[in-house]
Amino acid sequence: MSPNFEKSFYVTTPIYYVNDVPHIGHAYTTVAADIIARYKRLEGYEVFFLTGTDEHGQKVEKAAQERGVDPKTHCDQMVVRFQSLWKRLNISNNDFIRTTEIRHKKVVQKILQDLYDRGEIYQENYDGWYCIPCERFWTEKDLEEGKCPDCLRSVNEISEKNYFFRMSHYQSWLIEYIETNERFIFPPSRKNEILGFLRGSLEDLCISRPKKRLRWGIEIPFDPDYVTYVWFDALINYVTGIGYGSEKNPFSQFWPEAIHLIGKDILTTHTVYWPTMLKGIGLTPPKMVFAHGWWTIEGKKMSKSLQNVVEPNRLIDTYGVDAVRYFLVREVPFGMDGDFSHSAMVHRINSDLANDLGNLFSRALSMVVKYFDGLIPTPSQLQEVDRGLQEVSEKALLQLSKQMNDLAFHKALGSIWEIVSAGNKYIDETAPWALAKAEKDRPRLGTVLYQTLESLRLTALLLAAFMPSTSEKMWVQLGMEEPLWEQNLKESGKWGGLKPGRKV
Ligand code: MSP
C-alpha cells in the first residue's frame, strides 16, 4: 500500500455483539459506513473500512452456557450470520475483526501493559453494580430506581478487587479537546450531551473482572487471575484493525483519520472512555465520532419480547438489496431517530425508485433503441433548456461533496434526485417523441436524448455508493465500458462523459 497521507480515510462500525440476530439497527450503521467508504473511494481516497464482532464478556459466556457449547464454538457459529448478511448487503469492508483473534488479544495486552507501566492502572476494591445486557458498570448513584439507567433492566451487585484505569485524570483535557475540536462529536447536539455529562465528576474506569466470576475475556497481562472488561477490549478493535503495534502496518497511514459511526446509546464509551484510553497511551483521538439515532418499528421500540425485530434478510427477500440500502438512509436524516414501516418502504420504492428514476431511465433507453438503433447519438447545437439540465447536474455534484462530508445522506440523495427530476422535466419539455416525427428534427432529437442519457450517467455515478448494483447496471446499459468502481468523481463527474456511437 503506497502511503498517501492527504487522501486516507478510515471508517468503522461498532463491533456487534455476536449473540444478537443481526437486525435493522446493525444493518443501518453498516450500510451508512459502506456508503461513505464507497463514496470516498470514488473521490480518490485510499479507504480502510472496518467492521466486526464483539465476542467476549458475560453475555456471550452466558449464552454459550445455555446452549451447552464452549464460548469460542458459540462465537464461530454466530459470527457467520453477520458475515453473510454483509455479503448480501454488498458491504465493501476491507477487513472483519473478531475480538477473539490472536492479533487483537496481543494489542489489548500490549495497551494494558503499557498503561500499567506508565502508572495509569491500579488495583482497588470495587463496590458497584453491573448490567449484563449493556455490559456496563454503574455506581449506586447512576441507577434509576435500582435499575440500569440505560436499558432499565435489573443489575447485579458486585463487591470485589479490580483494576482501574485513571480516567478521572483526563477530565479537563477531554472537555477542552471536545470544545476545541468542533467535529469530534457529531451531530452537535451529541457534543452538548457529553459536555453536560462531563460537568459531573468523571470516575476512574473499572477495566477487569476476576476469573472466578468471568473466564471469557482477554487475560490481564500483569495478573493472570483477571480478564479484561469487555468494553475496554472492544474499543481497542479500532486500532487493532489497522495493525497498531505490528511492523509493516497501515496504522500510521490511517490513524487518526478515523470516523467511528455508532448508535446514540454507545456515545459515552466512544467519546469518554475511548479518547482517554488513547490519550493514556499517547495517541490522538479519532477525527470524528458520529452518533446516529434509533429506529422504532411502526411506532414501537424494537424488542425480542414484542417480536417486532426487523431482520434485514427478510427485507432484502421482499424489496431487494438496493431498495433497502436506499430506504435506510433516505427516510431519516442521519443522526435523528426514525420509524420503520412497510408502508413507508413501499411508498419510497414506488415514488422515488420506480416512478422518478426507473421510468426516466427506461423511457430514455427505449427511445434510443427505437430511433437510433440503440446507438448513443451525437449531440449538436445546445439550447438553453439543454444547458439548464447540465447546470442542475453540476450544481448537484458540488452540493453532494459537502453533504457527504457531513454524512447528510438524505440531503445527498435529495441532490441526486434534483438531477432525476430535472431529467423528467426536460424530457416532458423537449418532447423527443414529437421530434421523432420529422426527419429535419433528427439532430435535435439526438441532442435531447444525449443530454437525457448523460444526466442519467451522472446519476448512476453519484448513486453508486448508495445503490451499488443498480448503478452498475445503469452504467453498463449506458454503454460505459470503463468499470464504475475505477472512476474518479472529479474526472467522470464532468458533463459529457457519455460516448456517442456506443451501444446502449
Ligand atoms: N458491542 C457493542 C459495541 C462495541 S463498539 C467498540 C454494542 N453492540 S450491539 O450489537 O449491541 O449494538 C451495535 C449497534 O447497534 C449500536 O450502535 C446500537 O446503537 C445499534 N442499534 C441497536 N438497536 C438499534 C435500533 N433500534 N436502531 C438503530 N440502531 C440500533 O453495543
Image: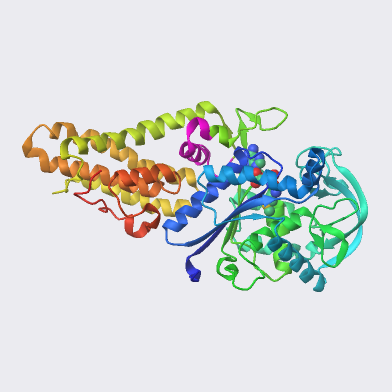
Magenta-colored stretch includes residue 278: no
**Residue 68 at x, y = what percent?**
81, 40
What's the residue at 37%, 56% (across, down)?
A: 489
Q: Locate residue 438 relative to residue 242 in the image: left or right.
A: left
* Colour treatment of the image: rainbow
Magenta extent? 316-336
**Residue 113 at x, y = what percent?**
79, 69
Q: Nearer the viewer, residue 375 or 452?
A: 375
What's the residue at 50%, 71% (across, down)?
A: 3
Q: Is residue 223 above or below residue 428?
A: below
What's the residue at 75%, 57% (across, down)?
A: 232
**Residue 329 at x, y = what percent?**
51, 41
Task: Point out the quarter of the image occupied by ligand 1.
Answer: top right
Please indicate, yes or no, whether residue 147 appears anywhere in the rendered image: yes
Please indicate, yes or no, whether residue 195 appears anywhere in the rendered image: no
Q: If the image is split into quadrants, where does the C terminus sit?
A: top left
Q: Locate residue 336 relative to residue 380 in the image: left or right.
A: right
Magenta-colored stretch includes residue 333: yes
Count of labels in the image: 0
**Residue 166 at x, y = what percent?**
81, 64
Q: Nearer the viewer, residue 77 or 201?
A: 77
Q: Nearer the viewer, residue 483 or 163?
A: 483
Q: Nearer the viewer, residue 30 or 434?
A: 30
